[in-house]
Amino acid sequence: MTAAAEVFFEQGYAATSIDSIIERTGGSKRNIYKEFGSKAGLFIALVSDTADEVLDALSDDGSRGRDLTEQLVGYARQLTTVYMSARLVGLLRVVMAEAIRFPDLAAAFYERGPGRAAARLVEILEEAKERGEIAQGDCQMAADQFCGMLRDNVHLQVVLGLRPALTTAEIEASATAAVRIFLDGIRVDASARPEPNDQ
Amino acid sequence: MTAAAEVFFEQGYAATSIDSIIERTGGSKRNIYKEFGSKAGLFIALVSDTADEVLDALSDDGSRGRDLTEQLVGYARQLTTVYMSARLVGLLRVVMAEAIRFPDLAAAFYERGPGRAAARLVEILEEAKERGEIAQGDCQMAADQFCGMLRDNVHLQVVLGLRPALTTAEIEASATAAVRIFLDGIRVDASARPEPNDQ
DNA sequence: GATTAGTGGTACTGACTGTTACCGTGATTT
DNA sequence: AAATCACGGTAACAGTCAGTACCACTAATC
């Protein structure tokens, strides 16, 4: 149940008691232990399920656009939306916190989530590179850094609970700005400055 | 003592017992409670001290370079070095995990750390904008996203314990690549493609 | 040398928690 | 209708832990 996962996400693994989960979800200890075996098993199952559910939304899309800009904006829009969702914020918090105690969980989370998303982006970039649209260079590193742009300081503030998640309009603005920088940079080349583009 | 902070960073707040801290640091409960009052007080003091210590290294530098590229590379190099340090990785983990329980700590961490670093970067960008070197646009957003590039997927893997921290050489490569993308983008402009630059 | 202050260590208490066992109830099956 | 099963709720057990109190020792002060 997703409600059980919320308790772990809010309070953390160690601070969450089985009783507090039952308070929120109903059911009995008997069946929790029958199905999951232990608190750790319950935690792993809940995190894995949530991760599957949330992260599968990452690997659907991104390539629907016609040209590279549209592809990347679509990709950034979707990735940012997922990163801003309450589910993923909680997941990120708890997986980071318990990465040492549950290394397998951390690895599974990364591979199914950010890793797979970056791999998809690498494909997009490799194709663009073959078409000659982007410069030669390390596509993996560029993809990783682009993903980082989407987990920017604003996202960090959301994860730290310092500000509410971005609205769709804000996500759109952030995604287009990120793609713009990623593709063209912010520098005004002195040799080719046709007009100051302010959009 | 920095050793006490390590215990919190490794195990998390709830999973760390006062006894386990004393095991590592020596001393007695008596004096811990005399000085810090409670476990939460100890935690806040340790995290605050560590944050001050580590994050002050963020706001020193960055503007030593002569031109914008050098400034940004220096900034990125230093920020990435700090972000990759074991101290900051542990700090990040525990602050994220306990952001709900200790919101003041999360706010203080952000403002003294990523917030201040981004503010410094905004200054650099605003100056460059006045000089006409970079395009008109939201410098705050650009700075936030640039900081995100430095907390890229590789950094996430480090935080999740999936790979060791970057070496200085790798940091250098990552920093220069990030600045290159940030300033000029990865696109090869079809109208001005003198030669494919592969470096 | 005696006294006092401060420290490390240990024991204790009360509360909490993971885990197991037990009891009562309602539904399903034969 | 009887019996079996599945489930929720409660209790019990064992271990841990925050926080307090106490004891022994050392060092400094008078």
Image (cartoon, coloured by chain):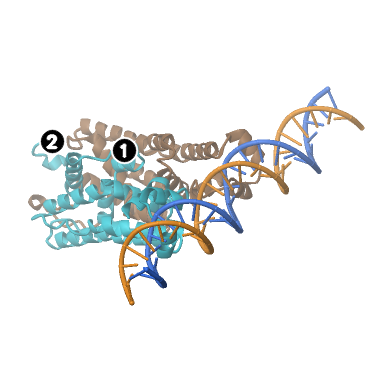
Chain colours: A cyan, B brown, C orange, D blue
**Residue type, numbered disc 2:** Asp
Q: Nearer the viewer, residue C22 or A122?
A: C22
Q: Nearer the viewer, residue A10 or B104?
A: A10
Placement of B145 over or under B116, stated as above or below: below
Residue that appears at 20% across and 36% down = B133
Q: Distance between the residues labelled 1 and 2?
A: 27 Å
Residue that appears at 44% across and 60% down = A30
Of the numbered discs in the image, which one, if any, rests on residue B66? 1
Tally of numbered tags: 2
Identify residue for label 2. A198
Residue B107 position, x and y percent, is 39, 35
Q: Is residue A113 left or right of residue B54?
A: left
Residue D12 position, x and y percent, is 58, 56
Task: Say which chain tag 2 marks.
Answer: A
**Residue type, numbered disc 1:** Arg
The crowding category of the residue bearing disc 2, from other C-alpha atoms within 10 Å (few below 14, some 14 to 19, many at least 20), is few
Q: Can residue A138 be seen in this view?
A: no
The N terminus of chain A is located in which quarter? bottom left
Task: Say which chain tag 1 marks.
Answer: B
Nearest-to-viewer mark from 1 and 2: 2
Residue that appears at 40% across and 64% down = A35
